[in-house]
Amino acid sequence: MSLQESIARYLAELARRGASKHTLRNYESDLLQLVEYCTPPGEEGAPLLEQLDLPLLREWLASLYDKGLTTISIRRKIAAVRAMFKFLRQEGITETNPATRLRTPRPGQRLPDVMSAEKTNNMLDAVEAGEPVEKPSRERDIAFLELLYGCGIRVGELVGIDLDDIDLSEGWLKVHGKGNKQRQVPVGERAVDAVNRYLQGRSAAPDERALFVNGQGRRLSDRQVRRLVKFYATFVTGDSTVHPHSFRHAYATHLLSDGADLRAIQELLGHARLSTTQKYTQVSLRGLQAVYDRAHPKA
């Protein structure tokens, strides 16, 4: 079996398990880059699966370092290869998993950049007021921005919301997270009001159950949301680095700063491990240190 055929079979299994489009897109990109590396110049056809041994994988790993990729990117690519071989072994397609012996680089202590509460709310207020431009989709855009910040959901979870998933009278949202795991998160009054206003003018195709739709009346894509968030952030705050996940970081950090329990934040974010949530304690401490440095006479 060719390496490319093996990848296609693995991706089909991930889709069957309910992996998000974002995950599928990233894994496909990472694995096809491996195919490209393993294909000698001038030769046609993908390499065979049995040609992918440990020495070749180590050469590929060295090439990733040479390209200057971040530790996070390299770890993700290694994880994709390992997971694919694990699946292929379970299916009886291969007997070994050479990727298990690859040395995974340790992640750095990089903390997420978090928008302040003032910056976040100023951006939401400006979009609601029609700044920087009056857009025909303004009611929809402010509604999904309010849900991103008010519920701390991922962009894939946002675009996956169906009409039946949100209970505006009770203020609850059913979120379909990674691996088809579901969780309930509360929806604040401001977000409820924004969604209600949007629903009054929502124009969707007759069979479309998605909450957020595009100009053709079909489900809004995560790429469209990313593009819109960048547009508003650039023109309102002057910061083009803001992305949908920035609101998730802000949600968690602001909850923690105001005294929310770390376990509760873990449940709200849908993290499988508490250690994933604990990074926000470091962000909060970093903010306290900055306040101390600015305000204390002995700092």
Image (cartoon, rainbow, N blue to C red):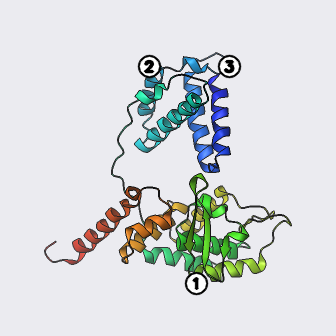
Q: In the rendered structure, are the residues bearing label 1 and label 2 in contact, judged by CB atoms less than 8 Å apart? A: no
Please, what is the three-letter code of the amino acid marked with disc 2?
Pro
The quadrant of the image that shows the N terminus is: top right
**Horizontal arrangement in the rendering, residue 180 relative to residue 239 (left or right):** right
Instruction: Report whether residue 239 is seen.
Output: no
> Which residue is rendered at x = 42% and y = 65% of the image?
114
Residue visible at 32% across and 62% down in the picture: 282
Q: Quadrant of the rendered structure where residue 38 is?
A: top right
Comes first in the chain, label 1 or label 2: 2
Q: Residues within 10 Å of mark 1 (few under 14, many from 20)?
A: few
Percent position of residue 270, x then y: 50, 61
Residue 161 numbered tag: none
Residue 198 lies, in percent from the top left, at 71, 77
Q: How far apart are marks 2 and 3 (CA)?
A: 21 Å
As helix, strand or loop, the secondary structure at mark 3 comes to: loop
Q: Residue at x 63, y 35 (%)?
A: 10
Q: Can residue 182 be seen in this view?
A: yes
Label 1 sits on residue: 189
Q: Are marks 2 and 3 in contact (CB under 8 Å)?
A: no
The one nearer the camera, 201 or 169, is: 169
| Secondary structure state at the residue bearing disc 2 | helix
Residue at the spot of label 3? 45
Relative to residue 287, is residue 171 depicted above or below?
A: below
Mark with earlier residue (1, 3):
3
Identify the disc placed on residue 55: 2
Within-10-Å neighbours for mark 2: few <14, some 14–19, many 20+: few
Amino acid of disc 3: Gly
Q: In this view, does 275 lie above or below 169?
A: above
The three-letter code of the residue at mark 1 reads: Glu
Q: Quick check: 154 left or right of 167?
A: left
Q: Is mark 1 on a helix, strand or loop?
A: helix
Q: Which of 131 and 189 is in front in this view?
A: 189
